[in-house]
Image: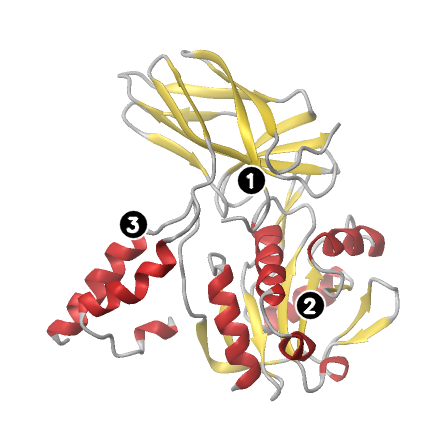
Amino acid sequence: MIAHNRVRLPHGLALLVLLLPSCRTPTLPTASATLGDLQIRQGFAYQPITNASGAAYLVIANGGSAADTLVDASSPIAAMTMFHGASMTSMGSVVIPPGTRVTFAPGGAHIMLTTLSTLPKAGDSLPLTLTFTRAGRVTLELPVREYGSE
Amino acid sequence: MRTGQVLGYATLAIAALTCKPAGLRPLGEGLVLEPALAKPDLVLTATDTRPFRLKEDTEGKIVLLYFGYTHCPDICPVTMANLAAALGRLSPEINQAVRVIFVTTDPRRDTPSVLRDWLDHFDPRFIGLRGDSAQVAAAMRALRLGEPIIVPGSNDTTYAVEHAAIVLGFTRDNLAHVGYAFGTRQEDWVRNIQALVTQ
């Protein structure tokens, strides 16, 4: 049970006023791209702590009438790139049915980069090339942010 | 339910939607654990390779206990970064009263030095502990966190470890009355840590 459910909540408007200060979350830079019927948004990567691994995130929306499949991701700074589902299971490819979106976001699915040749810092960008069976290939320059910067 | 409460919940829902930062859900307070969970009487190994008695060596301290691993892509580093930032905003007295403990669920890759270097990135005071997998799994079961699950990768070194993402907050009575889920933000941590210390 979540503790705040126990608190007798004041009138809605009063609560809104109380919550407003917490809305001042800084907007962090993200990368986006359009590739055929695909809209790619909210792309970013965390500043890796060690060379062992890093993680990248984005949302892919398929506005077309046919499914597309994300078959590969690669970055010149990573020896290997993998798609991980929310339960950390490896996914060889990711199908995006028409009219749907696939979300890679912290706490859920992510694109894992392993064995990094350099460590990008917050404010740098990390190039990531995505390959789709229908839409083709696109490279995004993902802004790098620090863990905890949200 | 009173009208005021309905309005309150509706407003909370709207505020939660509009204020949502990228991928994180604002959670505010912790999850109340009833019954409270006892601090495990565990002896693990610290990053300086000395034994660490979880109960005795944290007597009288507020303990924020987390199980995770250094190859973790986001939940573990985000949690540690937020805790470090929150402690940085709190007084030296509060910092002195708190111990952040990270127990690895991946002792194979998280050697003492790997664990130490990773924790130092956030806060050199964070305590890193290792134990054998069975011992750590038993402690996690007792704390109702489930057991870590090894998810094989494409080769022997790229496996992932699925694990609970809850920080348990132990008070001076050696009980965790509250757990904090992923999504707890820095300002929530500041308030919650203060509450744990001063209550």
Badge 3 crowding class, 10 Å Cα cut-off, few under 14, some 14 to 19, many 20 or more, is few
Image location (x, y in percent) of residue A74: 60, 21
Protein chain holding label 1? A
Q: Are marks 3 and 2 on the same chain?
A: yes
Q: Is residue B114 above or below residue B167?
A: above
What's the CA distance linking mark 1 and mark 3? 31 Å
Q: Which residue is mark 1?
A: A89
Q: Is residue B147 visible?
A: yes
Left or right? Give the position of B31 relative to B136: left
- Residue depth check, mark 1 versus mark 3: number of the one nearer the observer: 3
Q: Disc 3 vs disc 2: which is toward the camera? A: 3
Mark 1 or 2, closer to the camera = 2
Q: What residue appears at the point 82 percent right and 53 percent down from the top-left corner?
A: B111
Q: Which mark is residue B101?
A: 2
Image height of B64 relative to B130, above or below: below
Give percent across and percent down for residue A35.
Answer: 40, 14
Residue A16 in which image quadrant: bottom left
Q: Residue at 50% across / 39% down in the picture?
A: A85
Count of labels shown? Answer: 3
Question: Do circles 1 and 2 both sit on a common chain?
Answer: no
Which chain is indicated by disc 2? B
**To which chain does the residue with label 3 belong?**
B
Asked whether the viewer can see residue A91, the reply is: no
**10 Å crowding of disc 2: few (<14), some (14-19), many (20+):** many
Q: Tell me the element at label 1.
A: loop
Q: Which residue is mark 3?
A: B18
Query: Which one is nearer the viewer's eye here, A142 or B94?
Result: B94
**Residue type highlighted by circle 2:** Ile
Is the Cβ of the residue at disc 3 closer than 8 Å to that at disc 2? no
Instruction: Give percent across and percent down for residue B59.
Output: 71, 85
Q: Amino acid at mark 3?
A: Thr
